[in-house]
Image: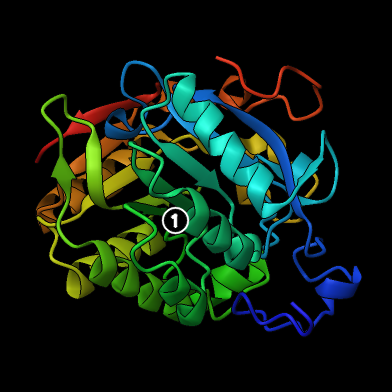
């Protein structure tokens, strides 16, 4: 991290000397929360929960970010080294987690890779890499063989929307290359006898108000790039306007409509995707962890399965 190039920003910050990158973090692994999380997709959460580790900071600046408290430097923060992160994963497994779910890990991916190399042989549960999709290929290749399940977002097909909402006009091309590399690494989805995912790729897409046509374009891009029956799509309706009320884009100040979401869902079905969808009732802040609360570090869904 002497001249950080971990993510597509290539910001060059000297994070090794404590300088903050575009992500807002130095080279010290910083975590806000580790818990058994029930609100992921069914093959991730299962009956006991996914062992989520929420990392602080982010390499995107989404104006509607639900985790803004920790993505912008606030909330409860705990600094860990690679050994301590490995121990945390083992603690989550001992607490009953179905998997280790690394949330917003991109800007710590080199340290995470080191930690996984140390602990992977001790864990009996899958590793889930849960990211924004804004990943560099070099960083992803460092994770080859260490990650079992990739759970990326694919937010936009339009560079203009990506620029306005996430300050990343190159997002579509970067995310497309990233999901292709992820699929190369993990291949076709594999499930255990209980329906939990052992290996594979779930691509998430959040439908935004007044952006249904871009959402359809996102799904078409994915279908043109990946074998739709070998991956899973998670089509989300959980957009929550209260996190974007201070932004200048008025369309983001309201909730998604049934028409908007259902039209995108119909397009997903026409493309042949298998996967997961959400009821509009999932658009609530109650499903966002309280990152201001200094709760026990490890503590104990909104998705339904959809097979077109």
Residue 27 lies left or right of residue 260; in this view the side is: right
Q: Is residue 177 above or below residue 74?
A: below
Tell me: residue 85, above or below residue 248. Answer: above
Q: Going by the picture, which residue comes out furthest to the right?
A: 18
- Taking the image as shown, residue 248 lies to the left or right of residue 211, namely right
Q: Can residue 216 be seen in this view?
A: yes
Residue displayed at 10% across by 28% down: 193
Q: Position of residue 208 (x, y in %)?
A: 49, 49
The structure residue drawn at horizontal position 28% and vertical position 61%, both measured from the top left corner, is 219
Q: Nearer the viewer, residue 254 or 20?
A: 20
201 with respect to 114 (left or right): left
Q: Mark 1 points at which residue?
A: 153
Q: Which residue is drawn at 44% across and 56% down?
A: 153
The answer to which quarter of the image holds residue 49 is: top left
Q: How many marks?
A: 1
Q: Where is residue 188 in the image (x, y as percent from the top left)?
A: 14, 57
Q: In which quarter of the image is the N terminus?
A: bottom right
**Mark 1 crowd level (few <14, some 14–19, many ≥20, 10 Å Cα):** many
- Residue 277: name its quadrant: top left
Which image quadrant: the C terminus? top left
Q: Residue 244: tell me if it is visible.
A: no
Residue 65 position, x and y percent, is 66, 47
In the rendered view, would you say 307 is above or below 18? above
- Display coloring: rainbow
- Badge 1 marks a residue whose secondary structure is loop
Q: Pick the residue in front: 149 or 222.
A: 149
Along the line of sight, the residue nearer the viewer: 256 or 65: 65
At 40% from the left edge and 63% from the top edge, which residue is drawn?
A: 214
Residue 176 point in image, percent of width and height = 37, 74
Residue 177's place in the image compared with 292, above or below, is below
């Amino acid at each position: 991290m002497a001249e950080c190039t971990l993510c597509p920003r290539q910001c060059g910050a000297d994070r090794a000397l404590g300088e903050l990158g575009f992500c807002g973090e130095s080279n010290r692994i910083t975590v806000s929360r580790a818990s058994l999380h029930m609100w992921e997709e069914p093959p991730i959460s299962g009956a006991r929960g996914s062992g989520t580790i929420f990392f602080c900071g982010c390499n995107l600046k989404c104006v509607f970010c639900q985790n803004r408290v920790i993505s912008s430097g606030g909330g409860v923060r705990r600094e860990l080294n690679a050994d301590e992160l490995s121990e945390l994963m083992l603690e989550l497994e001992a607490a009953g987690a179905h998997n280790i779910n690394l949330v917003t890990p991109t800007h710590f991916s080199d340290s995470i890779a080191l930690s996984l190399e140390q602990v992977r042989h001790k864990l009996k549960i899958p590793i889930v890499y849960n990211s924004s999709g804004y990943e560099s290929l070099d960083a992803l290749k460092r994770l080859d063989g260490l990650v079992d399940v990739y759970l990326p977002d694919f937010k936009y097909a339009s560079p203009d929307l990506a620029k306005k909402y996430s300050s990343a006009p190159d997002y579509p091309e970067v995310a497309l290359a990233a999901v292709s590399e992820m699929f190369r690494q993990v291949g076709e989805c594999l499930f255990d006898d209980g329906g939990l995912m052992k290996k594979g790729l779930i691509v998430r897409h959040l439908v935004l108000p007044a952006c249904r046509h871009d959402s359809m374009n996102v799904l078409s891009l994915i279908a043109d790039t990946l074998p739709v029956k070998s991956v899973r799509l998670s089509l989300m309706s959980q957009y929550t306007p209260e996190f974007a009320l201070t932004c200048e884009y008025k369309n983001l100040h309201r909730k998604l409509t049934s028409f908007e979401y259902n039209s995108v869902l119909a397009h997903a079905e026409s493309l042949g995707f298998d996967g997961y969808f959400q009821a509009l009732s999932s658009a609530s802040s109650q499903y966002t962890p309280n990152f201001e609360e200094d709760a026990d570090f490890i503590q104990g869904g909104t998705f339904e399965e959809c097979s077109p």
